[in-house]
Image: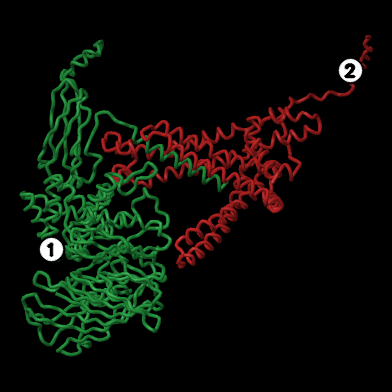
C-alpha cells in the first residue's frame, strides 16, 4: 500500500533531522482520492497544541507541563511537498484539526491534489522536511546524547472504513498507519551506535566523520530508530522461530550490561510463548533497546523494534523491570505490530489485549501472584495489579470509545489496559481457557497484517466459542456498568431456637438442626451469572448457581451444621468484579489479617514518632 | 580514639544504669502508637474481618490486595489513618520534650555525685551503682525546665530549618547537575553523598542543642541563650569526639533497624501476628537505646568539660513555726557532762 524511501541526516548537537521522503502510495481504496492527510506528530510538542493542552488538563505519561521549557519544543516542518506529475503543492498544504478544532494544533496537514488518484493507481509524493526533536516526550526525542527517532516523518493517514482516518495527536493516543515497505538511510556521526526497525542493509563511513546506515523493512507500518554513543550491543542471540531464525539485537546502557542476559532470556521466553499460543513471528530481526535512564523513552513499541526500561538497581525478584517491560513491549509486535488496530479509536485492542496476554505469559513464566514482585515476603502478580488498576476507575469510562475521549490519563490507563485484561480473563471463565486461547490464535492468524475493528475481534470469539456473548460484550465493552456482587448476609440459627438451651450438653448441640440462609446482592448494574460456594462446619460444601438477574437472592439450608462461609465466584474466574472483599463472608470474624496489617501500621507509627523525636528534640 | 571510646563507654554506662527511662519511654511510645493505630485497625477490620479474600494478606503479603483494601470506600480515607498516626507521633514528641530534662538530670545525678563523692569519701562504687534520681526529683526537673526546653526547641527549629533549607537547596542544585550526566549512578551517588553531608551537619546542630539542653538542666540555667552559647562553644571544642561518638551511635541504630527487620522477615512466620508484633516491638525498643546513648554521651561530655554540676537541692519539708520566747524566760544551759575515758 505504501512505500517510504527516506534519506535523513541527524545533527546530534542540535537534535535536528533534515530529510527527504519519497512516498509511493498505491490506491487500493476502490475509489478516487483527491486529498491526502499526513500526520506531523512532532508538532504536538508545542505549547498550544492539543497534545500539550490535554496533557495539562488530563495528565500524561511523562510530563505535567507545570512550566514550559524550550527543550520540550518539538517541530516537524515540511520544507517542500511535491506530487509527482502534479507539481509543487507546498503552498497549498493546510493544517486541519478534525478532532477538536484547535487552530493552533499542527499535527495533521492535508494535501489537496489538483487531480484525483484513480483506484488502483499509484501516486508519488516527494517531501523535504526538517525536524526539531524535543527532549524525550511520549517516547520520542533526545536525552543527553541519546535519541529515539519515533514519529519523526510525515506519515500518511489510513483509508479505513470508507474514509481517511488521520486523527490529531492527543495526549492519550498512539498511532495508526498503513503497512508497507520502508527503505531508510540515516546519516549521523560515526561515533553513534544505531538501531532501527527492519534489517540493516549497509553502513558506510563518510569523509565528514559521519556514517550512513541503511535499513529495509517489509510489511511494517512504522519506522523508528535510536542512536547513542554509549550503547553496548549484544547481537549474537538467535531465536529459532516457526518461520526461521530471528536475530535478536540488544542495545544496552553500559551500566546495565550485567542485565543483558535477563533481557535476552525474557525476550526468548516471550517469543516462545507467543509463537506457541498465538502464531509465528515472521520477521527476521528484533531490536530491543535499553533507553537512556531517566528519559521518557522507555516502554515503547515499534515494528521489530522495542524499548525496554531498567535501572542499575534491579534485583531479580523485582520483575517490574526489565522483564515486565520487555514482555509487554514484545507483545505489541503481535497486538499493534501485526494485528494493526487503530490506536486512536480502539486503544483497548492493542494495549488491553496485550495486557491480557501479558498476564497469561507472565503467569506461565513467573507463576501466578508473583509475576511482578516476589521479594522480601511481599508479592504481586500482574493479574492482581490489573485488577487494582481497573477497580480504581471502574465507573469512569466505557472501553469502546476513542482514546482521547477518556476522562483522564488515569481513566484511560485503568480502562484501556486494566479493564480489558480483566474482562478477557473473565471471558476465559465463561468460554473456557482453552477456547479463549484458540480464539486468540485464530484472531491473530486471521487479522495479522490488517486493521481489524472491535467487531472483528468479538465475532471471532463468538465464532470460536459457539456462544452468543452479546450480553457480556454489551456490558463489558460497549457500556460502562460496574460488576459487583456481594455476599450480603449469612445466618445460622437452630430451627428450635425458642427452646431453652441452659443445662444442655455439648453433645446435644451436635444434633441441633440449623436453619441457615445466604443472601447475595448485585450491588451495581452489571448482570452476570455467578457461582456460590457454601461451607458448613461439618465439612459439607454446597455449590449454587445464580443467574444474577435480580438485585438479590437468598439460599436456605436446613442441616445439622452451621454455615462457616459463603463465597461468590469460588474459582476466582470473575476478574471483572470490582470488589473482591465482599465476594465472601464468614460467620465468625477472623481478626488476624486486620491485626497483621495493623501491626505494620503500629510499627510505622511508632517508628515515625521515634524518628521525629530523634531529630527534633 | 581512646577518648572517644571513653565517652561512648561512659555514655553506655549511664544508659545501662538507667534502663528504666528507656522502658518508660518505650511504653509511652507503644501506648501512643496503639492510639495512633486504632483508626487504621478499625477501618481494616471493617474490610477484612469477614472476607476470605483477606487470607491473601495473612498467608503471605499480596501488595495488590493491600492496595485494594485502601481503595475500598468502607475503609475510609487513608488520610484519616495517617493523620491519626501523625498526631500521636507529635504527642510522643511533646511527651519526650516534657520528660527529657528528668532523664538528663537522672543521667547526671550518679555521675555528678560520684565525682564529688570520689574526692570526699571515696565511695564511687556506691554512688555509681546505687544512686538514682528519685521520682520527685525527676518530675521536678521536668517541670522546672519545661518552658526552657520549649524555648530551646523554637530556637533549634529556626536554626535547623534555615541550615537544612540551605543544604537541601544546594542538594537539589547538585542533583539537577548530576541528572545531566551520562553516568547513571551519579545522581544516586550524589543523592547519598549529599544526604550524608546533611546528616552530619544536622548531627552537629543536634549535638549543639543536646549540650545546650544538658546545660540548661544541669546548671539550672534560666537564660537559655547562655546555654545555647555554652553548647556552641563546647560543640566547637569537642567537635570531632562528639561527632564521631554520635555518628557511631547512629550507625548502631541503623544496624539495629536493619537487623530487626531482617530477623522479622527471616524468622517470623507470615501468619503469626503475635510473633510479628514481638519482633517489631523488640526492634523499636532497641531503637530507642541509641538516642538515649547519644544523650548520655552529651551528659558525660558536659560533666567532663563544663563542671561543676549543680546538684539538685534536696526537697526539705518546711519546719513548723517556732515561737519566739524572751531571753529572760529561757532556762540556763546545763553544761555537758565530760565523758570519762574508757578503761581498757
Residue nearest the observer in this picture, A399 or A302: A302
Q: Chain of mark 1?
A: A
Total numbered labels: 2
Residue nearest the observer in this picture, A473 or B184: B184
Q: Chain of mark 2?
A: B
Q: Which chain is green?
A: A
Residue where numbered disc 1 is placed:
A452
Residue positioned 30% across, 74% down in the render: A48
Residue positioned 12% across, 53% down in the render: A439
Whole-percent x, y for residue B153 in the image: 59, 49
Q: How far is the residue under mark 2 from the one under mark 1?
A: 126 Å
Are labels 2 and 1 assigned to the same chain?
no
Whole-percent x, y for residue A308 in the image: 32, 60
Classify mark 1: residues with Cα within 10 Å, few (<14), some (14-19) or many (20+). some
Whole-percent x, y for residue A327 in the image: 28, 56
Q: Which chain is red?
A: B
- Answer with left or right where residue B166 lies relative to residue A204: right
Residue where numbered disc 2 is placed:
B331
- Answer with left or right where residue A412 lies relative to residue A135: left
Amino acid at each position: 500500500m505504501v512505500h517510504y524511501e527516506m534519506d535523513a541526516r541527524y545533527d546530534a548537537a542540535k537534535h535536528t533531522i533534515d530529510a527527504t521522503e519519497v512516498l509511493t502510495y498505491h490506491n487500493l481504496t476502490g475509489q478516487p482520492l483527491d486529498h491526502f492527510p499526513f500526520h506531523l506528530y512532532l508538532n504536538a510538542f508545542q505549547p498550544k497544541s492539543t497534545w500539550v493542552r490535554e496533557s495539562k488538563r488530563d495528565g500524561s505519561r511523562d510530563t505535567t507541563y507545570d512550566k514550559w521549557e524550550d527543550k520540550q519544543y518539538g517541530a516537524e516542518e515540511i520544507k517542500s511537498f511535491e506530487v509527482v506529475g502534479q507539481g509543487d503543492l507546498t503552498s497549498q498544504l493546510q493544517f486541519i484539526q478534525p478532532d477538536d478544532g484547535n487552530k493552533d494544533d499542527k499535527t495533521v496537514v492535508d494535501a489537496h491534489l489538483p487531480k484525483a488518484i484513480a483506484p488502483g493507481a499509484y501516486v508519488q509524493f516527494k517531501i523535504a522536511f526538517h525536524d526539531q526533536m524535543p527532549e524525550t516526550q511520549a517516547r520520542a526525542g533526545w536525552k543527553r546524547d541519546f535519541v529515539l527517532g519515533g514519529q519523526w516523518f510525515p506519515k500518511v493517514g489510513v483509508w479505513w472504513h470508507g474514509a481517511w482516518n488521520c486523527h490529531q495527536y492527543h495526549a492519550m493516543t498512539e498511532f495508526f498507519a498503513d503497512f508497507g515497505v520502508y527503505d531508510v538511510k540515516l546519516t549521523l556521526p560515526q561515533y553513534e551506535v544505531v538501531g532501527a526497525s527492519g534489517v540493516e542493509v549497509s553502513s558506510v563511513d563518510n569523509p565528514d566523520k559521519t556514517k550512513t546506515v541503511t535499513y529495509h523493512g517489509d510489511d511494517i507500518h512504522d519506522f523508528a530508530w535510536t542512536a547513542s554513543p554509549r550503547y553496548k550491543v549484544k547481537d549474537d542471540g538467535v531465536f529459532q522461530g516457526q518461520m526461521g531464525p530471528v536475530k535478536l539485537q540488544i542495545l544496552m546502557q553500559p551500566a546495565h550490561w550485567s542485565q543483558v542476559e535477563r533481557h535476552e532470556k525474557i525476550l526468548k521466553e516471550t517469543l516462545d510463548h507467543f509463537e506457541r499460543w498465538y502464531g509465528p513471528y515472521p520477521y527476521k530481526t528484533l531490536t530491543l533497546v535499553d533507553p537512556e535512564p531517566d528519559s521518557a523513552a522507555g516502554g515503547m513499541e515499534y515494528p521489530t523494534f522495542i524499548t525496554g526500561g531498567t535501572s542499575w538497581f534491579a534485583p531479580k525478584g523485582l520483575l517490574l523491570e526489565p522483564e515486565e517491560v520487555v514482555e509487554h513491549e514484545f507483545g505489541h509486535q503481535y497486538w499493534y505490530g501485526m494485528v494493526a488496530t487503530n490506536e486512536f479509536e480502539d486503544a483497548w485492542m492493542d494495549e488491553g489485549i496485550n495486557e491480557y496476554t501479558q498476564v497469561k505469559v507472565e503467569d506461565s513464566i513467573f507463576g501466578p501472584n508473583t509475576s511482578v514482585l516476589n521479594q522480601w515476603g511481599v508479592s504481586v502478580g500482574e493479574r492482581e495489579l490489573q485488577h487494582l488498576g481497573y477497580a480504581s476507575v471502574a465507573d469512569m469510562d466505557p472501553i469502546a470509545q476513542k482514546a482521547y475521549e477518556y476522562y483522564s490519563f488515569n481513566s484511560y490507563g485503568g480502562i484501556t489496559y486494566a479493564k480489558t485484561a480483566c474482562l478477557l480473563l473473565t471471558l476465559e471463565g465463561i468460554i473456557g481457557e482453552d477456547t479463549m486461547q484458540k480464539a486468540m490464535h485464530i484472531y491473530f492468524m486471521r487479522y495479522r497484517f490488517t486493521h481489524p475493528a472491535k467487531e472483528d475481534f468479538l465475532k471471532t470469539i463468538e465464532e470460536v466459542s459457539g456462544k452468543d456473548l452479546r450480553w457480556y460484550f454489551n456490558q463489558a465493552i460497549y457500556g460502562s456498568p460496574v460488576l459487583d456482587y456481594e455476599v450480603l448476609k449469612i445466618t445460622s440459627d437452630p430451627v428450635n431456637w425458642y427452646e431453652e438451651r441452659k443445662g444442655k450438653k455439648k453433645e446435644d448441640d451436635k444434633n441441633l438442626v440449623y436453619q441457615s440462609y445466604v443472601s447475595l446482592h448485585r450491588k451495581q448494574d452489571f448482570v452476570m451469572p455467578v457461582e456460590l460456594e457454601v461451607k458448613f462446619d461439618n465439612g459439607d460444601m454446597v455449590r449454587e448457581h445464580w443467574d444474577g438477574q435480580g438485585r438479590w437472592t437468598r439460599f436456605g439450608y436446613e442441616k445439622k451444621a452451621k454455615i462457616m462461609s459463603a463465597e461468590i465466584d469460588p474459582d476466582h474466574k470473575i476478574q471483572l468484579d470490582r470488589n473482591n472483599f465482599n465476594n465472601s463472608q464468614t460467620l465468625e470474624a477472623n481478626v488476624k489479617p486486620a491485626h497483621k496489617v495493623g501491626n505494620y501500621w503500629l510499627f510505622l507509627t511508632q517508628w515515625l514518632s521515634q524518628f521525629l523525636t530523634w531529630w527534633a528534640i | 580514639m581512646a577518648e572517644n571510646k571513653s565517652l561512648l563507654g561512659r555514655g553506655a554506662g549511664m544508659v545501662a544504669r538507667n534502663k528504666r527511662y528507656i522502658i518508660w519511654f518505650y511504653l509511652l511510645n507503644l501506648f501512643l502508637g496503639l492510639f495512633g493505630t486504632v483508626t487504621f485497625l478499625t477501618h481494616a477490620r471493617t474490610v477484612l474481618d469477614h472476607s476470605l479474600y483477606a487470607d491473601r494478606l495473612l498467608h503471605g503479603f499480596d501488595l495488590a490486595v493491600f492496595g485494594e483494601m485502601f481503595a475500598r470506600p468502607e475503609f475510609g480515607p487513608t488520610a484519616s489513618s495517617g493523620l491519626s498516626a501523625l498526631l500521636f507521633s507529635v504527642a510522643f514528641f511533646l511527651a519526650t520534650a516534657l520528660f527529657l530534662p528528668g532523664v538528663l538530670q537522672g543521667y547526671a545525678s550518679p555521675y555528678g555525685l560520684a565525682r564529688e563523692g570520689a574526692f570526699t569519701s571515696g565511695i564511687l562504687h556506691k554512688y555509681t551503682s546505687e544512686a538514682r534520681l528519685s521520682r520527685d526529683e525527676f518530675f521536678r526537673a521536668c517541670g522546672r525546665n519545661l518552658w526552657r526546653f520549649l524555648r530551646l526547641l523554637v530556637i533549634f527549629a529556626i536554626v535547623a530549618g534555615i541550615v537544612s533549607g540551605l543544604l537541601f537547596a544546594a542538594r537539589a542544585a547538585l542533583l539537577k547537575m548530576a541528572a545531566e550526566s551520562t553516568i547513571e549512578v551519579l545522581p544516586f551517588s550524589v543523592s547519598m553523598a549529599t544526604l550524608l553531608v546533611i546528616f552530619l551537619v544536622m548531627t552537629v546542630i543536634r549535638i549543639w542543642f543536646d549540650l545546650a539542653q544538658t546545660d540548661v538542666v544541669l546548671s539550672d540555667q534560666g537564660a537559655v541563650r547562655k546555654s545555647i552559647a555554652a553548647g556552641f562553644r563546647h560543640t566547637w571544642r569537642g567537635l570531632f569526639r562528639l561527632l564521631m561518638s554520635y555518628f557511631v551511635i547512629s550507625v548502631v541504630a541503623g544496624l539495629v533497624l536493619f537487623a530487626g527487620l531482617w530477623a522479622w522477615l527471616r524468622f517470623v512466620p507470615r501468619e503469626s501476628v503475635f510473633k510479628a508484633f514481638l519482633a517489631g516491638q523488640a526492634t523499636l525498643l532497641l531503637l530507642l537505646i541509641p538516642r538515649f546513648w547519644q544523650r548520655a554521651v552529651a551528659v558525660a561530655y558536659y560533666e567532663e568539660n563544663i563542671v561543676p554540676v549543680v546538684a539538685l537541692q534536696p526537697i526539705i519539708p518546711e519546719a513548723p513555726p517556732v515561737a519566739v520566747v524572751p531571753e529572760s524566760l529561757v532556762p540556763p544551759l546545763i553544761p555537758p557532762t565530760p565523758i570519762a575515758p574508757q578503761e581498757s
